[in-house]
Image (cartoon, grey):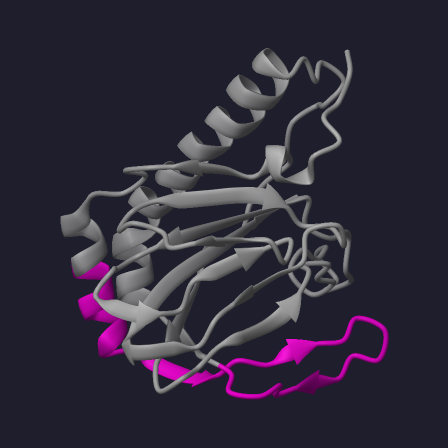
Amino acid sequence: MKMKSDLGHYIRTYKDTYTTDFCKDLVNTLDKSYSEKHKFYNGTTGEETHVGKDPENVWLDEPYAKQYREELMNGLFNVLEKYIVDDMCKKEGFDWFPGWNGYSFPKFIRYENNAEMKPHCDHIFDIFKDDQGNPRGVPILTMIVGLNEDYYGGDLNILFNKDYKLETGECIVFPSNFLYPHYVKPVEKGRRYSMISWVH
């Protein structure tokens, strides 16, 4: 088995992960939810900092998180089945890849007023913790879902060489390590909503 040297080969998109109606309902709920400016976390120093025109993290209130949880997690699970089992193990021959242990409840992000996400990789220390709150690993995969399309700008760029504008309900999956830098270009008009889950 020979692996592809083109890193872009391991970036995959999956349309219709969620219905347009589900995404619209979720966005309407997020519009009324608590938000705060996004911060980048430094795993070495533990410092959290703002970088440029950061977007906002939006938090679903518990009743809504409970209401949407099953459909959100099932959609992400189906994508993982397609990416890891179908695409990587069956089609690419990655028989040595054992799969995944779990994935996070989505994080929701809102971009407006020229907000952007600076280049980074998802080598995140503070997501997956043991019962004592100690980090137990970093993500192996990143899953990003587009929740709307009625905005201008805001393209997702991966590997500094390709832009993606996700359709409503479309999910993109790629490895989370340092070889996959990505960023979001400034949103010029409207609001861009996305959600992210990380796999361990």
Q: Quadrant of residue 79?
A: top left
Which quarter of the image is occupied by the C terminus? top right
Please tell me which residue lies in front, 100 or 94: 94
* Position of residue 59 in the picture relative to residue 54 (left or right): left
Q: Quadrant of residue 109?
A: bottom left
Query: Considering only vertical position in the picture, is 181 above or below 91?
Result: below
Q: Residue at x 37, y 55 (%)?
A: 165
Which quarter of the image is occupied by the N terminus? top right
Query: Considering only vertical position in the picture, is 36 above or below 190?
Result: below
Q: Residue at x 49, y 26 (%)?
A: 81
The residue furthest right is 44
Count of numbered marks: 0
Q: Quadrant of residue 199?
A: top right
Reply yes or no: does residue 174 show up in magenta. no
Instruction: Please state the extent of the stretch shown in magenta in the rendering.
Output: 25-54
* Position of residue 55 in the picture relative to residue 141 (left or right): left
* Position of residue 63 in the picture relative to residue 95 (left or right): left
Please tell me which residue lies in front, 160 or 130: 160
Can you give x and y, in whole percent of width and height, for residue 161 in the image?
60, 53
Q: Residue at x 52, y 29 (%)?
A: 83
The residue furthest front is 161
Can you give x and y, in whole percent of width and height, for residue 42 in the image?
76, 76
Query: Considering only vertical position in the picture, is 163 above or below 58?
Result: above
Can you give x and y, in whole percent of width and height, for residue 5 in the image?
75, 31
Please tell me which residue lies in front, 88 or 22: 88
Can you give x and y, in whole percent of width and height, for residue 108 in the image?
41, 66
